Image (cartoon, grey):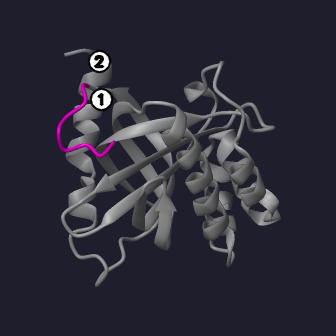
Amino acid sequence: MSDHEAAIAAAKRQIPSAEQLFATWPGAVPPVPSAVYADIDVYETGGFEDPRLVLYTAVSVLPSLTVGWCLFGAARNVRPGHPALPHAAREALENITAVRALQLLAVDHRETDEAAIEALAVPGVTGSLAALASGAHYEHERHSQPIGCDVGTAVYAYHHGPVRMGTVTADVVLIGSPIWIAKTEATDNQHQ
């Protein structure tokens, strides 16, 4: 086992899986910020004006609900050559507070994460970011294949659905930032 794999395994012992986090949904909403991990099929979107920022979207079909993933990674996760932000996603960024939250998340620093959480609490911001994820996910679903990944993420906010994520309707959208993203082999229980 590599050092990276060992670090992921150690992190998984400290944080819940998506199934565990949402075991009592909708009766109890998990706290934010929190952390969670899952095996999901991820689409990656670049094309933001801030080159430090990249968006990862995915959908998980859990026993009790369907979860949309809207994860914003910073510079260390960005790789060149990804398509520009789709039109529907650009339209979702008309909310200036949502843009501010993204600018803060792009910096990848504890203090800016805290400021981003405050920005995400402003009414309408999570809806704008869920719409951004929805638009990006829809475009990818029509034109590319997702990458099977083992993902751990910090969750900064939730947006209650229904939210259309491609061909699937999510009951809730997680808005967060990846702790790790590791490619895996696709499994039968992953939604594609």
The answer to whether the residues at label 2 and label 1 have Cβ atoms under 8 Å apart is yes
In terms of secondary structure, where does tag 1 sit? Answer: helix
Q: Is residue 59 above or below residue 84?
A: below
Is residue 18 positioned above or below 162 on the image? above
Eyeballing the image, is 179 above or below 100?
above
Magenta residues (range): 185-192
Q: Which residue is mark 2?
A: 3
**Residue under pointer 1:** 7
Residue 29 percent location from the top left of the image: 36, 77
| Magenta span includes 54 | no
The image shows residue 167 at horizontal and vertical percentages of: 43, 55
Query: Which residue lies at the image location 63% right of the left edge and 43% below the top edge?
Result: 109
**Looking at the magenta stretch, what is its main secondary structure?**
loop
Q: Nearer the viewer, residue 13 or 82?
A: 82
Foreground pick, 117 / 61? 61
> Does 188 appear in magenta?
yes
Foreground residue, 92 or 17?
Answer: 92
Q: Quadrant of the N terminus?
A: top left
| Amino acid at circle 1 | Ala
**Residue 139 left/right relative to 15:** right
**Amino acid type, callout 2:** Asp
